[in-house]
Image: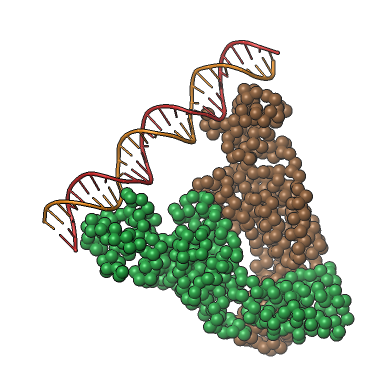
Chain colours: A brown, B green, C orange, D red
DNA sequence: TGTTAGCACTCGACTGATTTGAGTGCTAAC
DNA sequence: GTTAGCACTCAAATCAGTCGAGTGCTAACA
């Protein structure tokens, strides 16, 4: 059944009010705002209808109403006013994002930080899986005292490094670096299968006078370092903000939520399920019971036309959706633009 | 005035009990444990004495007693039983710490993680200031599309990298790398003053056909990257654990504490004030009001014979001091050993 | 027919009195 | 010096009573 125009206005007023106060909203409160010019009694009748239709919930007989998940959903889809980012906010965002930006990781972390600053909610971001980025360069640096540092630089600006206990001299390190580069540079992590690594190892053993053990050692590390690029990283920002909401005035619940936010697997799964563009999951629409009283708004970011990660905001169900959506949208655009500048479409930099 | 043997035993029993329960301890509770074979009345008398002497506090007339800061201090200095690390704990510690360890940062983070796992309290670690480590190597990698990645590797295994928008070709990058290395490699961050950088810039301008703007750009980044090594990094682990203590059952207080733990400057200052070896600050002994209900146990770790950083545990005043001390001691020893292996004394690796 | 004033009703939140019980200090007896 | 006993204290729990925000329903009104 369609909602009459008046019902929509009342529902909107109720949700707007509830977002601010976190207290059940009574008919008189809406009537007093006098935007509709209706008495509390009339609004009461409409509210009773709205409750029957599933948009509102009455915690107990003598309390006002709060929105149901369905109510929020309708609000988000149809009622919500567009939030206009303030000029200052946009300028601040631009200032931060255009500070010297170096690596992918830094950009993502910054985006998360900005999102949590703008919205004052908890943010979660996932970094791209990098199995499509190419090995730009491998470098072995002899650190002396039997240690060699292996550094791998990818076309996406990620640097992986690990020190290995292998006793070689500078000269040999340089030669090995050269040979390795000629074999490995330009490959994607996907292409660097274990078999391929082994094959390279066999080839090298022929042209370098080196103990097989040492070579295998090094190649093993290279493999692992590259392999780890496959991992999706997750960063959480401003988790403590949940403690400010009356929804989490119970310490036990707050602890539960914080524990949830510390579990990377949860978060990857949670955010991974989102659809492209701005995605909103209200309350029980989330697959995790821990979030049944929270909402999650996510937006993807891309390199070229390929979605590589998501930025998400977790807050109480009565979050300021309009503001969150506007902020995320803005941030995602900026991130896209910067990634584009840095890595030109395919990360083929 | 000296405490009689019996008073000491009673004080110890009270604090042991209070550490477990967080509830004021009554005379009957102590009497019932029957370790001393005294009636509650006798213990009552002694407790009255101990209170008068400042070791105990009575929250209100009809409550039991809780230890005062002075009481804890005496407990820590004289009464506390030595905590014996379990074999499993030590094995676990060893297993984690001897996993492939690469950089300094990883080691420190691991140490912090282990400390929080073992003690179940919040841990704070500071990473070394690295102004005494030497530049091992500088490398400019042309990323294409007008971006150059500057990579700096230090003798302590730290890698700093930043991408800069400068349009040069591979060949020039290689030459510049070579020249830069010949001038800068081997220097400490301290030696690389801004003046020195400028001087190098002037020299290079003579021998390379390069626009001054580009060179200054690069050297600026080099300077900043190296300069940032001077920063002490702080990592906090398991901050959420404070939510488990009745001391923080008030969400407001918990939030305050978490905010404090997010402020890096606070933490550096807090931990920086500690004396060498194991240092214990009980309640108001800490300079920050936020910690007046908490205790802080720190231990330093060293490279060679030089103290380079500290690992700290923050918990309620009634923390299990013996266990925390034993754990930190053990961890610090392991860290020392590993740093020693990796960087051989002076970080001259 | 839609709107509104009025009123009885509900029920959580607050208030204040009362009870409970853990724990004390003091005294007197051992 | 130790302890049993007892009066006393006081926070916390319990309970009854009140308040008031908010509702649903009805009847009157435009």
State the residue in front, B116 or A285: B116
Asked if residue A234 is positioned above or below residue A290 in the image, the reply reads below
- Which image quadrant is residue B131 in? bottom right
Q: How far from the left and from the top, in percent, is residue B287?
A: 51, 64
| Residue at (63% x, 56% y) in the render | A237
State the residue in front, B54 or B65: B54
Considering the image in quadrants, where does the C terminus of chain B appear?
bottom right
Q: How many marks do you count on the picture?
A: 0
Considering the image in quadrants, where does the N terminus of chain B appear?
bottom left
| Residue at (74% x, 43% y) in the render | A83
Q: How far from the left and from the top, in percent, is residue A200?
A: 71, 78
| Residue at (85% x, 81% y) in the render | B205
| Residue at (56% x, 60% y) in the render | B261
Q: How far from the left and from the top, in percent, is residue A67?
A: 61, 36
State the residue in front, A172 or B78: B78
Q: How far from the left and from the top, in percent, is residue A224?
A: 64, 71
B164 relative position to A69: left or right: right
Look at the image and tell me whether residue B164 can be seen: yes
Asked if residue A31 is positioned above or below residue B298 in the image, the reply reads above
State the residue in front, A108 or B92: A108
Look at the image and tell me whether residue A185 can be seen: no
């Amino acid at each position: 059944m369609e909602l009459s125009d008046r019902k929509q206005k009342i529902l909107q007023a109720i949700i707007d009010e509830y977002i601010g106060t976190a207290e059940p909203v009574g008919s008189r409160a809406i009537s007093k705002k006098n935007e509709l010019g209706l008495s509390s009694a009339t609004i009461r009748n409409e509210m009773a209808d709205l409750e029957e239709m599933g948009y509102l919930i009455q915690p107990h007989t003598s309390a006002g109403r709060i929105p149901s998940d369905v109510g929020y959903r309708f609000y988000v889809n149809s009622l919500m006013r567009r939030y206009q980012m303030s000029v200052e906010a946009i300028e601040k965002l631009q200032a931060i994002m255009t500070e010297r930006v170096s690596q992918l990781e830094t950009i993502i972390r910054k985006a998360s930080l900005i999102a949590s600053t703008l919205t004052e909610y908890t943010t979660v971001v996932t970094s791209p899986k990098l199995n499509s980025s190419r090995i730009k360069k491998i470098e072995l640096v002899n650190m002396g005292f039997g240690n060699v540092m292996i550094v791998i630089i990818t076309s996406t600006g990620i640097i992986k490094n690990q020190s290995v206990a292998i006793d070689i001299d500078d000269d040999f390190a340089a030669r090995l670096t050269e040979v390795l580069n000629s074999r490995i540079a330009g490959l994607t992590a996907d292409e660097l299968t274990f078999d391929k690594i082994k094959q390279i190892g066999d080839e090298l053993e022929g042209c370098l006078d080196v103990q097989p053990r040492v070579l295998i050692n090094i190649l093993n590390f290279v493999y692992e370092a590259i392999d780890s690029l496959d991992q999706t990283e997750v960063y959480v920002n401003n988790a403590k903000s949940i403690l400010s909401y009356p929804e989490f005035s119970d310490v036990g619940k707050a602890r539960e939520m914080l524990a949830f936010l510390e579990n990377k697997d949860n978060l990857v799964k949670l955010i991974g399920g989102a659809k492209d563009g701005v995605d909103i999951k209200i309350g029980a629409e989330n697959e995790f019971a821990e979030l049944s009283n929270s909402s999650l708004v996510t937006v993807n970011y891309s390199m070229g036309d390929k979605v590589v990660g998501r930025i998400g905001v977790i807050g109480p169900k009565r979050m300021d959706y309009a503001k969150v959506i506007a902020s995320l949208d803005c941030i995602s655009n900026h991130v896209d633009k910067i990634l584009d500048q840095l890595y030109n479409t395919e990360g083929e930099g």
